[in-house]
Image: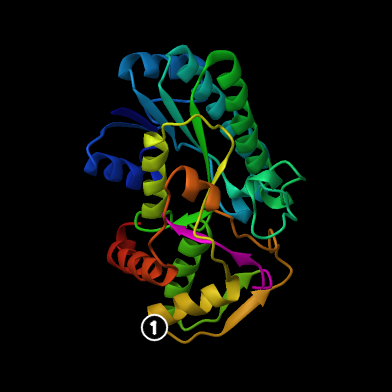
Amino acid sequence: MRILLTGGTGFVGTNLCKYLRDIGHSVTSVNSILWDLRRQETCEEMMDQIKPDAVVHAAGTVGGIGANQLHPGKFMYENLIMGANVVHSCMLSKVNKLIMLGTVCSYPKYTPTPFEEGYFWEGYPEETNAPYGIAKKTIGEMTKHYLTEYGLNTVNLIPVNMYGPHDNFNLQTSHVIPALIKKIDAASRDGKPLTVWGTGTPTREFLHVRDFCSAVQKAIEFKGVDVDPFNIGTGKEISIKELVNTITAEIGCELEIRYDSSRPDGQPKRRLEISRAQKQLGYDPVISLSEGLKETIAWYQANKETL
């Protein structure tokens, strides 16, 4: 298929582009330098020029808790406007399939664990990343109505926190695993204590990016029509404290770890129920957290001088 991939130079996009090309698709990867998705006319021009069979919308303005707290308006506006423009342009161009990448941040703060798709609209998201989560779930809801009125076939994927090679290690915008890898590596060389935000007690689920790429492949190949969200994860969770200890052991250092409870923990627990994606899409994650962390740490060690 001829696939248009937005956000193609980002962490997820870089891995997706290689994965989809390796299995035989023709992928045109676009980024914000050449195509400003915040402008509707730009999106329409992009569709007219590339003429894709399918679109994977991986572009987004993203970051960890700190970035979300600093830029809630920017995160909400840019993710909302980019998503709306892409959906509308796909409808105008009569694209056969649109794959939308949502976020686990869209779930209510106190969703029962494991998160089931039926809980998606049962409350307000966790405050520190609510603007981003609300923007993404609004676009997901938009696709339902574009199916009803215009026949736009969309698959909405809701991934948990992803990690892997080519991750974002910028501490101003990075997520949990790359931030911890970089901080622990630096502390191991400096011999200084490591301070971690929050209490360390929240649990998180982490998905290796190649397992997510396989989910996108399954979504592209999906023959049905179902715009309700599909959870994409592993079904397993780990506490932040345990994660810190695991990364420290893999890097091979002993550190004094301090937890700053004055900093926010974020959502108390996150673990997805993934049986819907397994049954309908044939999704099957295979990379363990231990295996994935080893690979990601090795990639970081080999590339850190250029990051």
Residue found at the far front of this picture: 279
Location of residue 27 in the rendering, given as x and y in whole percent from the top left corner: 28, 32
Disc 1 marks which residue? Answer: 252
205 in magenta: yes
Q: How many discs mark residues in the rendered view? A: 1
59 in magenta: no
In this picture, residue 2 sits left or right of residue 107: left
In this picture, residue 180 sits left or right of residue 106: left
Q: Quadrant of the C terminus?
A: bottom left
Q: Amino acid at mark 1?
A: Gly
Look at the image and give the residue range highlighted in magenta.
198-208
Q: Secondary structure at mark 1?
A: loop
- Residue at (59% x, 14% y) in the render: 149
Depicted 203 relative to depicted 282: above or below: below
Crowd around label 1: few <14 · some 14–19 · many ≥20 (10 Å): few
- Residue at (38% x, 61% y) in the render: 286
